[in-house]
Image (tube, helix red, strand yellow):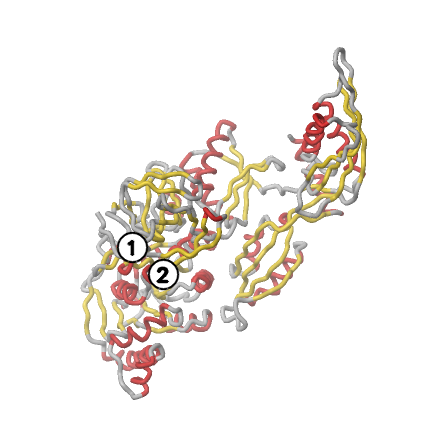
Amino acid sequence: MVKKYAKENIRNVVILGHAGTGKSTLMDAILFTGKKIKKIGSHNDGSLVSDFDIEEKKKKMSVHTAMGFVESEDIKINIIDCPGHADLIGERRAAIQTADAAILVLDSVDGVQVGTEKAWRYLAEQKIPRIIFVNKMDQERASYENVIASMEATLHANLVVAAIPISEGDSFDGIVDIIEMKSMKQKSPGSAEITRGEIPPELTEKVQQQRSRTVELAAEGDDELIELFLEGNDFDAEKIYRGINEQIRDNKLHPVICGAALNGVGIQTLLHFIKEFMPSPAEKSEMKALDLDNDGAEIIIKCNEKEPFTAVVWKTYIDQFAGKFSYFRVISGELNSDIELQNTDCKEKEKISKIYTMIGKDLEEVEGLSTGDLGVFVKLDKTITTDTLCDMSRNIKVPLINLPGPVFGYSIKAKEKKDEEKLGQILNRYDEQYPTLHYSYNAETRQSTLYGMGQLHLDITLDEIHEKYNIEFEVSVPRISYCETITKVAEAQYKHKKQSGGHGQYGEVYLRLHPKTRGEGSSFKESIVGGVVPKNYIPGVEKGVNEALKEGAVARYPVVDVEAELYDGSFHPVDSSEMSFKIASAHAFKKAMNEAGPVLLEPIMSVSVYVDNQYVGDVMGDVTSRRGRVLGMDSKDETNKEGITRIRALIPHAELLRYSIDLTALTQNKAVFEMEFSSYEPISGRVADKVIADREIMLAEE
């Protein structure tokens, strides 16, 4: 059983980088060095700890975040390994918001890549301290100096080079620790143990130059040290640690080291630097929360062990055999087994019998967790990702995990009718498991749709469902939810009169339709004078109006932003009924709408495109070609050192169905976008004609 660690002795670190840089192999190397696994795995044979899912083994790439931990010198290091592909952004963003520090992995040949830049931006946004690990120093054409130069030029990073390779390429077998001024080599190939030795003579000059630069950077972080530096004093390792530590935590400096994860080289130094330089949860003393007993008012809670227990679920994983795993971070208080917690999102209680952590897919029971630690609950029925779990005395929501909304969708339909219900249940579970997936049924378009962060994201998800549950289904481009409205005031009268023996049916209605402000919604009011329509029949009139709102006059799409006013009518003392007035009002509404200048409305999305500066002109031209309106451009600061511009625009939803694919191609994968619904706007001309024609075909087929 894993012991409980105090928050000062915990490090929560996320591994990030471009796809293919060896992040999952690095996770294995850390676990191997920390004696948690017996050997470093490989993508080729599906033996990596992180990539345990069926789809990961099949595609030989990471699809989900995975967790592990090592214990060293009374320090517990929790590691979160993230997938690198651009479409799997949700997994990365949740992990970044959960962790306190990061390892950014770069390839020794390719250096800074698109995924590197995106990860760097996310880390900068969250103000996450990071160590840069240049991996694969044992491959042909490896160049540590070139990678460092590319980081300084592209990321504008202020780097402190804390280690250099003894050699590069096939002969790479160790590094020189610039701070400790020692060479670090493996005792034997594949060993987790290292031998410390003297610096090779041929590297003395190079090491000394780098050491001088490191001492200078350290001096800048401490007034006492700057005086010693100006007096010409050299610094020992303790002074260098002291000088750069605070600067690293404040994101003013970023340490760079190197290694070869597959062979376990450089990992001991990496773990040492995590312990020395990366912050513990103890440095996060408070956090914003929402007081649910006070209408969600913002409050500040203390992040320490003396406070009531609070945790946030940052990931959910459902295994078809083992069940549901809820990954969480302790925000405050301490957690021990056999406790009852309150889920403040769904107002349900969850019984906790045991507490776990994980190494890949394997559970390890823990005796308890302190503030800031990461853990896993098993088989929580009501809890989903982003939920807050609290001590029964507390009723708050901690908005720790904020994720972008889905941007790419498929209409999905089971091939066999017998599988429809099962497929719906599975997709609902996936919707619950992953916040960047959204599954719903649209009554207007008669389609079930699954939205995600891109084509690959959805393809992976659907391949996984097919493999695990053996269901055949078809996918297509989803239809758009159009609406209709009116542009002017119009009136209409309709008398419903029917005699068929016994009591007949009678109801006469005069309706006046008024256009309302876009987004205001539809409403009903009555201004009857003299009881020409008795009060007990007016609910029938309103029901008829609501029924008529479901299908408009242009293309039978729902009607929005209309006020229907009942201003006159007549009744029969025997034959009138609520149903008669419902039928009459529905017909009156349709007649009036035909005279009220009906128009089609299409959904308009508010879009933010984050794009490399060199592609700004291309993206703006593309927005215009999609009937979009550019609202403006900005960057994070006046100097825009990151080289990223945000383009804000309004674009019709119909023009965005393949935008994630097209934007990737247009910008060489150097842009991402986020979108959310903005409003409905009228359409006419050829665009409207096509929508009407497509609607007629759809209704005819049904």
Left or right of 654: which side holds 366? left
Quarter of the figure with residue 265? bottom left
Q: Position of residue 214 (x, y in %)?
A: 32, 77
Left or right of 574: which side holds 451? left
- Work out which residue is located at the far top of the displayed protein and give it: 501
The residue indicated by pointer 1 is: 28
**Residue at the spot x=38%, y=43% of the render?**
317
* Callout 2 amino acid: Lys
Q: Position of residue 660 (x, y in %)?
A: 55, 53
Helix, strand or loop status at disc 2:
loop
Instruction: Name the front one of labels 2 and 1.
Output: 2
Above or below: residue 552 compared with residue 653: above
Q: Nearer the viewer, residue 525 or 595?
A: 525
Helix, strand or loop status at disc 1:
helix
Above or below: residue 314 compared with residue 583: below
Quarter of the figure with residue 80? bottom left
* Callout 1 amino acid: Asp
Q: Position of residue 173 (x, y in %)?
A: 25, 67
The residue indicated by pointer 2 is: 284
| Callout 2–callout 1 Cβ contact below 8 Å | no
**Residue at the spot x=45%, y=69% of the render?**
155
- Work out which residue is located at the far front of the displayed protein and give it: 530
Q: Position of residue 11 (x, y in %)?
A: 30, 59
Left or right of 111: which side holds 600? right
Q: Nearer the viewer, residue 89 or 297?
A: 297
Q: CA distance from mark 2 to mark 1?
A: 29 Å
